[in-house]
Image (tube, grey):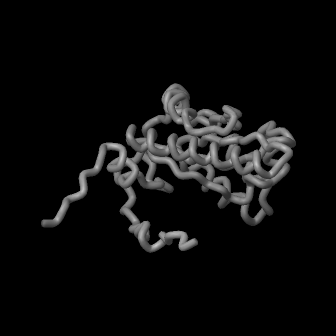
Amino acid sequence: MEQTKQFTELAKLIQARRSVKKGYNNKLVEKKTILELLNSAIWAPTHGMRQPWRFIFVGADQKEAFAKKIAATYPEEKQENREDYLNEPSAILVVVMDVPDNQKQYDENFGATASMIHNFQLLAWEQQLGVVWKTNPHIYDPVVKTILDVNEDEKIVGFIHMGYFDEAPIAKLRKSAEEKFTTFEG
């Protein structure tokens, strides 16, 4: 007899979530909504309770000026493209992480921040808010760090592009865990 898989609501949510890169509609992404989502997302595992993250919200009223400043850090021939690109989402959340002095704590901080971002993605998806975690070259640019008042002992982990959408992206299949799984044969 074939056993059918029973999926929890959480498993269904994890499998349904998609990165929404474009196709945002005109519904406003409000700061209040983002704070509500973040207040749940920050319950991610964080070694030593360091909570190594902070956030910079760029709403609709600031997006055009923000896009112009960030795009200006690119070579002139790419600036218009980058400005259009940064104006495409309805809002942007810049995620900044504390950078400690040692590699172990850096890895722990990055893992915690990535976990928090994933929590945020799931919570946003549940609210039909599309998000995608972007790591374009500008997040590594010292001039962008200066524009955003990011300290020397901090790292921009990514720009989270956000917007409500009318049509969800098509699911892309994943390799099964069995294809990536081995057993230690000590």
Q: Which of 82 and 151 is in front in this view?
A: 151
Q: Is residue 106 rendered to the left or right of residue 20? A: right
Count of labels in the image: 0
Q: Where is residue 55 in the image (x, y as percent from the top left)?
A: 66, 35
Q: Is residue 133 rendered to the left or right of residue 142? A: left
Residue at x 12%, y 66% (from the top left corner): 1
Q: Is residue 94 rendered to the left or right of residue 127? A: right
Q: In which quarter of the image is the C terminus?
A: bottom right
Residue at x 61%, y 40% (from the top left corner): 93
Tell me: residue 20, above or below residue 125: below
Q: Which of 153 and 77 is in front in this view?
A: 153
Look at the image and tell me whether residue 78 can be seen: yes
Tell me: residue 38, above or below residue 72: above
* Rendering quarter of residue 152: top right
What is the residue that sits farthest to the front in this orientation?
A: 186
Look at the image and tell me whether residue 146 can be seen: no
Tell me: residue 186, above or below residue 5: below
Q: Position of residue 104 (x, y in %)?
A: 76, 50
What is the residue that sits farthest to the left in this orientation?
A: 1
Residue at x 66%, y 53% (from the top left corner): 83
Tell me: residue 79, above or below residue 33: below
Residue at x 47%, y 35% (from the top left corner): 28
Q: Where is residue 166 in the image (x, y as percent from the top left)?
A: 35, 49
* Rendering quarter of residue 47: top right
Q: Nearer the viewer, residue 106 or 32?
A: 106
Q: Where is residue 91 in the image (x, y as percent from the top left)?
A: 56, 41
Q: Which of 99 and 158 is in front in this view?
A: 99
